[in-house]
Amino acid sequence: MISLTKINKSYKTGQGSLHVLKDVDLEIGKGELVSIMGSSGSGKSTLLNILGILDQYDSGDYYLDDKLIKNLSDSAAAEYRNRFLGFVFQSFNLLSFKTAQENVALPLYYQNVSRRERNAIALDYLEMVGLKDWYHHMPNQLSGGQKQRVAIARALISKPKVVLADEPTGALDSKTSYEVMNLFKKVNEQGITVIIVTHEHDISRLCDRAIKLKDGVIHNGEDESAFTS
Amino acid sequence: MFDFDRWQEILSVLWMNKLRTIITGTSVAWAIFMMVFLMGGGNGLQNGVEYMFKDDAINAFWIWPDATSMPYQGLPVGREIHLENSDHDRISGFEGIVESSGRFNIRGAFNIKYKEKAQAFSVRGVHSGHLEIEKTIMTHGRFISDRDNEELRKVAVIGKLVSEEFFPSPEKALGEWIDIKGGLYQVVGVFEDIGGDREMQMVYLPIETAQIANNGGQRMSQLLLTVDPEMSVANTLLLEDKIRADFARKFKFDPKDERAIGIRNGLENWQRFQTMFFGIKLIIGFTGVLTLLAGVIAVSNIMLITVKERTKEIGVKKALGAKPKHIIGSIMQESIFITLTSGYLGLVVGVALMWAANTALAALEMEMQFFRNPEISWQMAAASLVLLVVAGALGGLIPAWKAANISPVEAMSA
C-alpha cells in the first residue's frame, strides 16, 4: 500500500539546512495497523506529513497504492488526500461552526456530493462511531473522546485506503484513549490501513507493528528504551 | 451559486467577529455614502446652473454698445457707440444666424395704468425673434409679430405678474387697452418666463412703435441673436470676430477693441460651465474612488487578519481535500459580501438623504439659484454596485492568495 525508497528531506534553517529524514525506506502493507514512534525531533512528524501528501520530499520515491506521489500540484495533492487518505489529528480539528454531522460530511463537500446526500452518509458514519444521537451537536458541546470519534468518522467518510492519525490519543485520558484505539482496530478490521503516530508505548503495543524513528533514520528491532525520553 | 456551506461559514465567522465586521463595513459604507453625497451634490449644482441657462437660449449672442477703449485712426478713446435698427437688419443676414431681435428699453420711472389701477413695470420694444431668444413662454394670445413692427401697431404683450396686477384672469386681459406713458396699447398676449419674477413683470412692445413713442429714433439698447444650434464653439468664436469686425468698420474702431461693442457668447459660456462641471465631477469621482480605495484597504486588511487567525482551519480543510479554488473562492466571496452589503447600505442611506434634501427643498420652496434637484441616477447607482463587487474582489485578492498558499502542514500543528 505504501512504499518509500530512499526518502530524504531537509529544512532550511538560519545557518544551513537540517537533514530531517535520511534515506528512509519503508513498506506498509494493505490492511496493516502500524505505529510510528520516535521522540520529538526524530522526524516522525515530517514522515507523517510526507505520507499524508501534506509536504514534499527532496529525493527518493513514494508510492501510495502503486501511484508515484511526486511533484504534485496543490490541486492534485488535495484530490489525492481527499480520495486516498483520512486524517485524525491530536487536537481533533473540528470546524467550530459546523455540527458533528456537517463536520463528518466535509470531505464529501470537496467531492461535490450534494448536501442532502453527504449529510445522510455522515449520519451512517456517526452511527458507526456511536454518536448518531449527537449529530446536531456543535463541537464545543462534545467531550474530547466524542470529538475524536467525530473526527474518525470524518476521516472515514471518503472511504480512504489509509488513515493517518497524528497522536490521536494525545489529548485524551487513558480510558478514552483505549476506546479510540478500539475504534481504530475496528476500522482496521475493515481492511483499511491505519498508521498512528504516537509516543505512548501502550498505544503502540496495540498496533501490529511499530516503526521506530531516531534522528531521521528507521531503527527496527532495537531496544525500545532507546526511544523513550 | 448558492452554496449553503460556504454561506454558513462566512456568516458565522462574521457573526463571531461582530464588532470587527461592523467597523470594516462602516468604512466601505462611508466611502459609498460620501461618493453618493458628493455626486448628488455635484448634480444639484449642475442642475441649478443648467436651469439658469434654460432662461435664455444657450446658443444666443448678446451684443451691447459701450465706448471705445483704444484710439483708432486719430479718433479718441471713450467715444460712445450706439446701435441702430439698420445694424439689426444687417447682422441678422449673417450666415449661421437663426433668430435676431433688437431691444429698446424705455427708461425712467413711470406707471402703467389700467382703469384706476397704476403700477410701475419695465417696458421694452423688441422684434419678433425675441420670443425664441428669451425663451418666453406664451400662455395666452400671441407675441409681437413682424407685422406689428411694419405697421407700427400699438400692441403690448404682458408678463403674468403684470396681468395679475391689472386683470382678474389672463383671458380677461386680451383685447384690453393699457396706458403706457400716455399712449394706449392693446394687450395681445400674456407670457410666462422661468427666469423668475423680474422677467414676468415685463411688458413687450413692437420695437419701432416703442422708439417712436419715446423719442428713441433708431436706437437699440441691445442686439440679441441665436446661432445655428449645430454650430461648434470654435465657429461661434469666428462669428463673434466677424460681427465685431463689421461693427468696427461701420463705427470706425479698432477690431481688437473689445470694449466698444460687448458680445456675450452663450455657447461659449455654456461650454465653459460644462467644462467646469466635467472638472468638478472628475474631482468628485477621484475623491470617491480614493475614499473607496481606503475602504477596500480596510476590508483587505481585515481579511488578512481573518486568514491569519484561521490558518490552522484552512490547513485542516486542505488536509481534508480542499483545493486552492475552494479556499480562494471562500475568501473572495466573504470579501465581496462585506463590501457589497455595507456599500449597498451606504448607497441606500446616501440616496435616502438625497431624497430627503430634495423633499425639503421642495417643501420649503426654497429658491436656490445654484442648487437644484440633487440626485443620483439609477445608472450611477448600478455602476457603483458593480464598482463595489470589483472593489470587494480587489480587497480579497491578497488575502485569498495568502490563504491559498497556507501549507496543509498547518493542520498538524497542535
Image (tube, coloured by chain):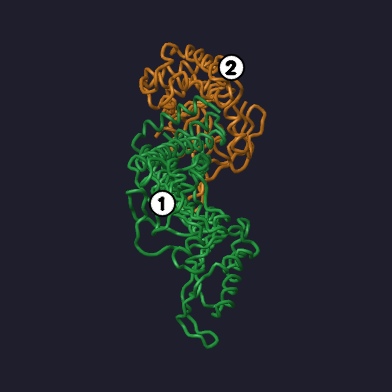
Chain colours: A orange, B green
Quadrant holding the C terminus of chain B: top left
- Give how far apart the Cα atoms at labels 2 and 1 are: 116 Å
Residue B191, horizontal then vertical, whole percent? 46, 47
Q: Could you say which is closer to the camera, residue A174 or residue B273?
A: B273
Left or right placement of residue B223 versus residue B365 in this view: right
Crowding near the residue tagged with mark 2, few <14, some 14–19, many ≥20 C-alpha atoms within 10 Å: some
Q: Which residue is mark 1?
A: B178
Left or right placement of residue A190 versus residue B194 in this view: right
Q: Could you say which is closer to the camera, residue B148 or residue A165?
A: B148
Q: Could you say which is closer to the camera, residue A83 or residue A195?
A: A83
Residue B166, horizontal then vertical, whole percent? 37, 46
Tell which subunit mark 1 falls on. Answer: B
Q: Check contact, mark 2 vs mark 1: CB within 8 A.
A: no
Residue at image x 53%, y 28%?
B320
Quadrant holding the N terminus of chain B: top right
Instruction: Give above or below for B84 relative to B37.
Output: below
The amino acid beneath tag 1 is Ile
The amino acid beneath tag 2 is Gly
Q: Which residue is mark 2?
A: A191
Q: Secondary structure at mark 1?
A: strand
Q: Secondary structure at mark 2?
A: loop
Residue B208, horizontal then vertical, whole percent? 52, 62
Observer-side mark, 2 or 1, equals 1
Residue at image x 42%, y 16%?
A136
